[in-house]
Amino acid sequence: MALKTTATASSADAVLLKQRFARRMADDAMFYPLFDHMPGVSFFAKDEKFRIVAANRHFYERFGFEKESDIIGQDDFTLFPTGLAEHFRRDDAEVLATGVAKLNIVELFFNRQRIPDWFITNKLPVLDRKGKVMGLMGTTQSYESKKQILQPFMQIDKAVNYIREHFRKKVSVEELAAMVHLSPRQLQRKFVEAFGSSPQAFIMKLRIQAACLALKEESAQISEVARAMGFADQSSFTQHFQRHLGMTPLRYLRQFRLRRI
């Protein structure tokens, strides 16, 4: 009985110690700059309206901003193509609605060198003083810096890396399967298990994301982007682009040019 009382008292003391420490902190004191010293880790926080309210240096520099205040108030639809933004919004909305964290989400982004890379994302609810969900916070970490999480996918790692380097060219499933000593059917199954899509869908997603980056350039021409991304013609490019993002390349290009005005 005495042991139980001691344990309870120690637990209560711990809570009081934590509360006293939190009350002494300055209003703008934050822990998240610590992530700047963890290679490959980005931190973000959003309010209940999905607006960014905090971000560490790694996160905002990925979008070309020089300071945190430049990204505050923005949301995924101002930072990402519509298709990606809608995907991220669904995850955010689920965390806000349920108060349950979403951990180890494997997602595809282009890194700061504009090379397609896999990132592991974690999203957790942020609670107010009454225990109500008031937003969410999360981290993203690059594939290279957290490969251990992706161990189940390592059997097709060589094929994934080849796609990342050659997605602008024609890549066959048979060619990829031979690299990792699997049959085309086995490779197909491994890709679906790991990433939820076939190798060809995986390649197309990379092409469309790379096209989005290329179309942001002031001198971008749709026909040239289509050719650079390995599409047979501009019509094929437009068809795939609209299927993935819900808009034509021309509309996407005009949106970003209007934002510069």
Image (cartoon, rainbow, N blue to C red):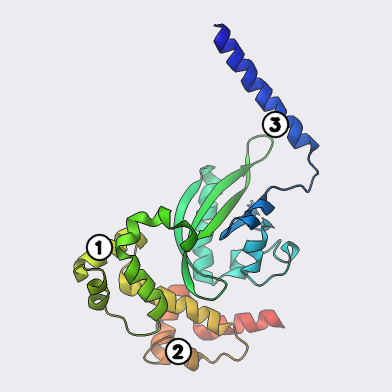
Q: Is residue 88 left or right of residue 244?
A: right
Q: Badge 1: how crowded within 10 Å, few (<14), some, or many (20+)?
A: some
Indicate the amino acid at tag 2.
Ala
**Residue 95 visible in image:** yes
Above-or-below relation of 174 to 126 = below
Q: Residue at x 55, y 12 (%)?
A: 4
Q: Position of residue 151 (x, y in %)?
A: 36, 55
Question: On the image, numbered disc 2 is attached to which residue?
Answer: 228
Mark 2 or mark 3, which is nearer to you? Answer: 3
Question: On the image, numbered disc 1 is attached to which residue?
Answer: 189
Secondary structure, mark 3, is helix
Which one is earlier in the sequence, the residue at label 2 or at label 1? Answer: 1
Q: Position of residue 215 (x, y in %)?
A: 55, 84
Labels 2 and 1 touching (C-beta < 8 A): no
Q: Badge 2: how crowded within 10 Å, few (<14), some, or many (20+)?
A: some
Question: On the image, numbered disc 3 is attached to which residue?
Answer: 18
Q: Position of residue 66 (x, y in %)?
A: 72, 69
Which one is earlier in the sequence, the residue at label 2 or at label 3? Answer: 3
